[in-house]
Image (cartoon, rainbow, N blue to C red):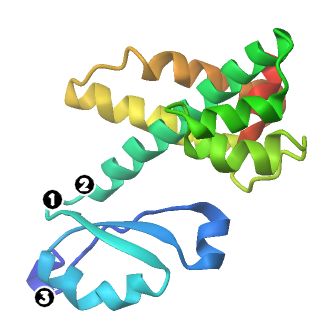
Amino acid sequence: VLREHDIAALDSPVSGGVHGALAGTLAVMVSGPRGEFEILHPVWSAIGHATFVSEQAGAAQTMKLINNLIAATTLAVTAETMVLGVKAGLDPQVMIDVLNAGSGGTHASRDKFPRAVLPRTFDYGFATGLMTKDVLLYLDEARTQGSPVALAEPVARLWERTQAEEGAESDFTSVVKPME
């Protein structure tokens, strides 16, 4: 219908949260007609880094779900391993330093844990309910595509548990609390 009226539609979800929006460093994933992407690229550049994903409608949304599942999983596994370390007597800050110096370093260990988990503020700026929604949407899309969900399913259960225990409005860094 839009094409009949010479109107282009582009998907352009973002990743990077409130901090990225304020800093102008959002990751913008775009799908739709490539020519329209090129025309509008300066608009997206004002808020972050725009990446053309595909001309296929909805591809950018799928990419965002993939990105968010990886973020949800790395945050959850960092939380789980940090809980083990603390219970075994390791200093949490030393653990973060070692992880970040080695191959275990992730965005969760470099930014989320130092900023919101170790100081126990749980105020990174993204709601548990939104992360849970994104993980469940990933599961729906993966099942629709006939893609495996062997890792995504237990991650989804963990996020649902966190939402049930901590509340949908809690900060997603509170994923560590049910594990403690």
Going by the picture, which residue comes out furthest to the top? 88
Q: Residue at x 62, y 42 (%)?
A: 108
Relative to residue 16, is residue 62 depicted above or below? above
Residue 45: quadrant of the picture: bottom left
- Amino acid marked by disc 3: Asp
Looking at the image, tell me whether mark 1 or mark 3 is earlier in sequence order: 3
Disc 2 is placed on an element classified as helix
Depth check, mark 1 against mark 3: the one in front is: 1
- Amino acid marked by disc 2: Ala
Q: Which residue is mark 3?
A: 6
Residue 180 location (% of width, % of height)? 84, 17
Q: Nearer the viewer, residue 95 or 147?
A: 95
Crowd band around label 2 with a 10 angstrom C-alpha radius: few (<14), some (14–19), many (20+): many
How far is the residue under mark 1 from the one under mark 3?
18 Å
Relative to residue 73, is residue 66 depicted above or below? below
Q: Which residue is mark 2?
A: 59
State yes or no: discs 1 and 2 in contact (Cβ < 8 Å).
yes
